[in-house]
Image: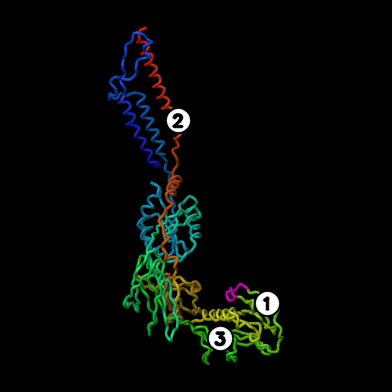
Amino acid sequence: MEILFTNLAGFWALLGIPVVLAIHLLQRQATQVTISTRFLLEKTRSESTEGRRIERLRASIPLWLQLLLVLILTWLLVEPRWQNNNAVQRVALVLDSSASMQASKQSLLSSLPEILDNIGSPGVRAEFVAIDSSLRNEGIYHGDDQSDLINSIDRWVPLEGEHDPVPALEIARSLVGKDGLVVFVTDHAAPNLPFGAHLLAVGKVIQNVGFTGSSLSNEKGSLQWKALIKNYSDAPQERQWSVYIDDNPQPSRPISLKPGQTLTVGGDFPDQIERFSLVLQPDEFVLDDRLPIIRPSPKTITVSLGKDTDENNPFAAVLASLDGINTTPPANAPPDVLIATYNPLDPAIPNQNAIVSISDRLGKQEASQGQIVAVNDPLVRGLNWQGLIARSSLKIPKLETDNVLLWQGDRPLILLRTIGGVQRLIFNFDLTASNANRLPAFVILVSRFIEKIRNQKIGLANLNVETGQALQLAANSGEEAQNLTVRWDSYTAKHEKTLPLAQLSSFRAPNEPGFFEVSQGDKFILKGAASFADTREADFRDAVTVSSLDSAASNLVQYHTREDPYWKIWTILATAVLLLNWHLRSRRTMSQDRSLSSSSPT
C-alpha cells in the first residue's frame, strides 16, 4: 500500500532537529559560588561569567524525546494518506467544438500533458473520456493512454458555431460518475458550470481580420458581387486580399482597417466563370480568410397561370418577384404548380401541386365577420393577417385531413390540402373581391409555398450558403435509388463521403469554407459555396486563459486515498512526549535546587 504526502511543506518541520541539537550543544555552563550565609544567595547572579560555549553532545532522555517530538509533528504536518487498493480515476474532457477553438488548439495540446499529470494521483490508474460539446460527432476518445488521448485531440477539428455545452456536460458526468472529474475545455470564461464541471480555458487574444459575408445583385445588366471584411481587433490592421479563379490567384490588393472597422470590396462576377474565391492574407484564425462564391441558380419552377393570364391575376406580381420562375411551361410537361380557380359547377380540385382560389362574382357583398386567427404552421408563422378584408362568398368544402392555416370566426379562410404527396394551397374566399394581394402576408405566403414545392423538386441548384447550414435535398427515393455522394474541399485536402437516402432531411453544408457538390449517380442535384460568417466565433477579444483545476486535484486525492488511521495515536504520543519532557526538566531543576541548598553553609 502506497503512502501519499499531501502537504509537502510540512517537511520544513524537520528543521527542528538541528535546532534541538544546537540547543543541547550551546548550553550555559553552571558556575559554583561559595557563600558563608544562606541569605546572601538571593544577591548572587545566576549568569555564567564565561558565557555560551559548545559542549560535547551528551545523550540524554530529554534530547531523544525532543527529537522524537519533532519527527511526530513532521509526520502529522505532511498529512500522509494511504492509497486505496485498485483505485481508478475517471476524467471526462468536454471539448468546446466552437470554431474559435481552432486558434487555441495548439496551446491546448502543448499544455495538456502537464495538466493531466497535475490532476493525476500517484499509483492510481486513470481512465479518460473526451467528447465534443456539440454532440454531433462520436466520442473523441475513451481509454487509459494519455498519449492516445492527446493524439485523438490533435485529430479533432472544432468547426461549430455558438452552442450550449450543458447537454454534453450532463453526459460527461454520467460517464464518469459522481466522483469523477468533468473538465470543460474552451477558450473563454464560463463561470457557474453545472454538474460540478471544472473550467480549463486556453484562449488567447489574437488580431483577427476576416470576411463576414457576401451578396450578389444584378446591376446594369451584369452580376455584381460584394464582400465585407471586418477587423475584430482593437488595433489598426493591414492585409492583402485577392481573387482566385480555379486556384489561380489574381493580383493582390491592400486594405487598411481601423479598430473594429468593416469595409466593403466588390466587382463584376467574372464572365463565363461559374465560381471563384476571395482569399485574405492568413492570420491565426483561418476559417474566415477564404470566401467562396458561386454563380447562383435556383431550381426552375414552372408555374401555369391557367386561363387568367392577364395583369389582374393576383398571383402574377408575386411570381414576377421570385427568381427561377417560368410562367410558360412546355406543352409536353405538366407545370410544377398550377394556378387554378374553383368552379362550384365543376367542384374538382386539381390533382397536382396547385394554388386554388374562388371566383364568386355573384356572392354576397358584405365582408366576413369574426376574429382572424392564424395557426402555428411554417407557412403562416409570423405573418400579420389582421388587415384582411374578405367577402362572404361561397366556400370550398373542408376535408377532415385539411390543415387550416387561417380562420375567421368558424370559417376556414386558407387551407393546405395534402393528399398522396400532392399539395394544394386553397384560398377559401374570392381574392379579386378582397384586399389580400395588397397585404405583405399574402406575398410571403405564396412565396413560401412556391419555395416548398421548389425544395421538393428534383433538380440542380447552385447556392451560396453558410458553413454548417441545414439544407433540404430532393432525390429519387425508389427501391433501386442510389445513395448520394458529397464532395467538398477544405484548406488542406479534398473530401468525399456517401450520404444515405435516410439522411437527406439532416443534410448540412460542410463546416469548412469551400465549394461542395451533391450528386446521385451521374446527376448533380446541388452545387454550393459554403462561407464562414459567424462573427461571434471570429472575435477573440474576450479570449482568456484560466483554470479551476487546482481544487479538483486535491478533491481527487481525497477521494482516492484515506487519511492516516493512526493520527490520533500520533497526537496522543506527541502530547505524552511533551509532558514527559517537561516532567524530566522540572525534576532536574528541583534536583539542582536541592543540591545547591545542601552545599551552602548554614
Which label lies toward us, 3 or 2? 3
Quadrant of the image containing the C terminus? top left
User: Residue at (59%, 92%) from the top-left corner?
Assistant: 307
Question: Left of 361 or right of it: where is 530?
Answer: left
The span from disc 3 to disc 2 (Cα, nearest Å) is: 98 Å
Which label lies toward us, 1 or 2? 1
Closer to us: 452 or 120: 452
The span from disc 1 to disc 3 (Cα, nearest Å) is: 26 Å
Mark 1 and mark 3 lie on one chain; the one further toward the N terminus is: 3
Which label lies toward us, 1 or 3? 3
Residue 132 percent across, percent down from the top left = 45, 61
Mark 1 and mark 2 lie on one chain; the one further toward the N terminus is: 1
In the rendered structure, which segment of residues is drawn in magenta? Answer: 375-383
Q: Image height check: is 278 above or below 88?
A: below
Residue 199 visible to an observer of this rendering:
yes
Residue type indicated by callout 2:
Ile
Could you say whether the residue bearing mark 3 is in a helix, strand or loop?
helix
Closer to us: 415 or 360: 360
* Residue bearing mark 2: 572
* Residue bearing mark 1: 408
Residue 84 percent across, percent down from the top left = 43, 44
Q: Magenta part mainly helix, strand or loop? A: loop
* Residue bearing mark 3: 317
Give the numbered dot on residue 429. Answer: none
The span from disc 1 to disc 2 (Cα, nearest Å) is: 89 Å
Residue 377: in magenta span = yes
